[in-house]
Amino acid sequence: MTHELTRTGPGLSRRGLLQLAGAGAVLLGSAGCGTPERAGAGGAAFVYGRGADAVSLDPMNQTDSESYAVIHQVFDSLLRYAPDGALLPALATAVPAPEDNGRQYTFELREDVRFHDGTPLDAEAVVFNFRRWRESDHPYHRGGGPQSSKFAYYANLFGGFDEESVISRVEAVGPHAVRFTLREPYGPFLPTLAGAQFGIASPTAIRQDVEGFWERPVGTGPFALASWEHGNKITLRRNESWWGTRQAGPGRRVDTVVLTSIPDSTARVAALVGGGLSAVNGIVPQDADALRETAGFTVAQHPQECFSYFAMNTRRAPFQNPLVRKAIAHAIDLPRIVEHFFGARAEVAGAPLYGISTFVDRSIRPHPYDPGLARRLLAEAGMPGGFRTSLWYMSTARPYMPDGKGVAQVVQANLAEVGIAAELVTYELATYVERTGKGMHDIAMFGGTTIGVDSYFPLNYWYAGASATPENSSNLSFFQNPQVDALLAEARVTTDPEEQRALYATVQRIVHDEVPVLPIAYVSPPIALRSGFAGFGTNIAMDDLDALTV
């Protein structure tokens, strides 16, 4: 039996896009944005439409990509990623070499760098940030807002807080020099520090109001926060004294960046065509194709830096049984879903890892669509008549999931064909993240975006037993496998690339065979822009905004 692929709305033709132009200004008015041309004297504004607002702008207390996109503009880390994934210095003057057989690293910091509030960046500021994150009894080991992740990134990446942390000591060894001492060699140490969650914050601002820092962040980045109207828009102003130097093209530079939240994809496209937005993300493939054919617009395509998946909660019946999880994997028609909802530039995922990761194992093939096999597996599991469950989906477009409701409706129909009745459940993004982190779901749609090529972090973040915490869990399947944990622990202290490749491949194979998550797609998300903007890169973190001109 076949089924009809459905969407939350029809794909737009070129004629349809033009018809939306008149509605765009009205929709944009309700979103609270002005036109892209209005900014401060001599400068232009870049108004970016996205599906959801940020959750927290305290770098180590957020876990969502919408927060990450803003944090990337406001903060700098010690290191950063080049577009090809190579490590580059940021607040550090160079990428340091390991000392003491990989147990120490010394970072020389840039001089004459200041935070947005005028506080100088020095070694003590870096030490303050790392102690705040690492020490559970630190007076400022708190904050992050009402939906704080409670420093979950740090605990996940470095094994925990206090004595459990891989980092045993952080000390100033000069006015602009910081030394890290590790309990053991840690292969992913330098790539980890390039993440935006390790953005260095102003100690002055944190001491003044640690509980309010999540909505009034102060960093050293190319843009500073001007205002945040929660649920509506975030406005950033250019940091004139930023330390970085990037070559800007001809024309007026962008002095103001406005990130506005428009949950509906069609409304975002309408606002773009109507002239009120400079760019939008989270658009479905059909609308991206129509914009490519419409004068005055361009569509930038990312590499496969996004990965989407379904997590099956192995703490709940009947998902403790791998036969049930395998049945679901064979019941879902992923090729048709990916073709229809993600476009020709996406790929059905086999390995449970980002498509651009250095050690992704491309030999792992997706679970084939086979409803007959799914029924036989359910019968073998003692459930020939199927069962009832819930399927959670994301209500707003994400770079890795442009139409969560549409995908969920098709999956619901797929599961019904093999006797599984799935109730669809959704929440606004922040609540969705919070509740899935507590394991309140049966099957949940999720995913992620990366700007680097490191493999340890996502594998550990999604599949390690220690990542399955009672709250703020990043392991949304709550998968527990001692062999996976042992392999990741070994990979963590290994610096030989071929040894790492073998260890990570085995982890991916175990996850594929046990199916705690069902990979959906390696996604190359499109971003549509009004023509005229120069210097916009194709990185989801929008790390070239400081070089934009119009």
Image (tube, grey):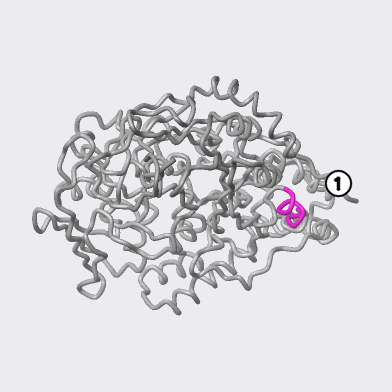
Query: Would you identify the image quadrant in which residue 549 lies?
Result: top left
SS category of the residue bearing label 1? loop
Query: Is the magenta region chiefly helix, strand or loop?
Result: helix
Q: Where does residue 547 sit, x and y in percent of width and height?
A: 37, 47
Left or right of 301, for residue 497: left
Q: Quadrant of the C terminus?
A: top left
Q: Where does residue 331 sit, x and y in percent of width and height?
A: 78, 54
Q: Where does residue 221 sit, x and y in percent of width and height?
A: 30, 44
Query: Would you identify the image quadrant in which residue 172 lies?
Result: bottom left
Dot 1 amino acid type: His
Name the residue furthest front. Answer: 250
Q: Is residue 158 visible?
A: no
User: Which of 52/380 is in front?
Assistant: 52
Q: Residue at x 60, y 39 (%)?
A: 397
Question: Is residue 134 placed above or below 85 in the rendered structure?
Answer: above
Q: Residue at x 69, y 39 (%)?
A: 390
Tell whether position 131 is magenta. no
Name the residue furthest left. Answer: 174
Question: Is residue 100 placed above or below 276 in the rendered structure?
Answer: below
Q: Where does residue 108 sit, x and y in percent of width and height?
A: 17, 60
Q: Which residue is mark 1?
A: 3
Q: Residue at x 58, y 23 (%)?
A: 25
User: Which of 61/354 is in front?
Assistant: 354
Q: Residue at x 48, y 73 (%)?
A: 503
Q: Is residue 341 visible?
A: yes
Left or right of 15, for residue 345: left
Query: Would you identify the image quadrant in which residue 27 lies?
Result: top right
Tell whether position 333 is magenta. yes
Magenta region: 332-340
All told, the count of numbered labels is 1
* Callout 1 crowding tier (Cα within 10 Å): few <14, some 14–19, many ≥20: few
